[in-house]
Amino acid sequence: MKGIPLILLAVLLGATGQVIMKMGMKIYGEVSATSVWGQLVPILKVPQVFLGFVCYGLSAVLWIAVVSNVDLSLAYPMVSLAYVVVFLASWLFLGEHISAMRIAGLILIVAGVLVISRS
C-alpha cells in the first residue's frame, strides 16, 4: 500500500505534537476554554507548545498528501493509531497512569485498525 508510510508519518507527527504540547502546558499551567484566546500569545512563547504546534502543523500538511492519494475510508481510521502513540508516550514521558481498562480499549483500537488496513 503506497500511502501507508505517509499515513504513519503524519500520524506520528500529530501524536508527537500532542505530547510535546502537553509538556509545554505543564510548564505554562492550566487554561480554560474561555481564557485560552486571551493567553494564546504567551502560551505559544513556551518552546514546547510552539514545537508541538509545528509538529501538528506538519502533520496536517502531510495529511493533505495522504487524502489526495489514499481512500479516506482507509486513511482516516489509521489516525486512531495516534491513540496508541499518545497512550505510550503519556505513560513513558508524562508519567500518566495506565489502567487495565485503558489497555483493553487500546487493544480494541489496534484490532480495529488491523482489520481495516487488511481490507
Image (spheres, rainbow, N blue to C red):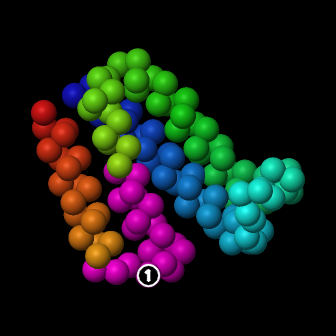
- 93 on left or right of 22: left
Say which residue appears at 34% left-offset and 80% top-offset: 99
Say which residue appears at 26% left-offset and 32% top-offset: 74
State whether residue 119 is above or below residue 25: above
Say which residue appears at 75% left-offset and 71% top-offset: 29
The overriding secondary structure of the stretch rendered in magenta is: helix
Residue 117 appears in view: yes
Say which residue appears at 32% left-offset and 42% top-offset: 78
- Residue picked out by circle 1: 97
Residue 93 is a magenta residue: yes
Q: Amino acid at mark 1?
A: His
State whether residue 75 is above or below residue 38: above
State whether residue 53 is above or below residue 5: below
Res 71 quadrant in image: top left
Q: Which residues are magenta?
A: 81-100
Task: Please provide percent x and percent y for residue 41.
Answer: 85, 50
Where's the N terminus, which quadrant?
Answer: top left
Total tally of numbered discs in the picture: 1
Task: Please provide percent x and percent y for residue 62.
Answer: 49, 30
Residue 92 is a magenta residue: yes
Where's the C terminus, which quadrant?
Answer: top left
Residue at the limit of the structure toward the front, as seen here? 34
Task: Please provide percent x and percent y for residue 24.
Answer: 69, 64
State whether residue 23 is above or below residue 80: below
Helix, strand or loop status at disc 1: loop
Residue 3 appears in view: no
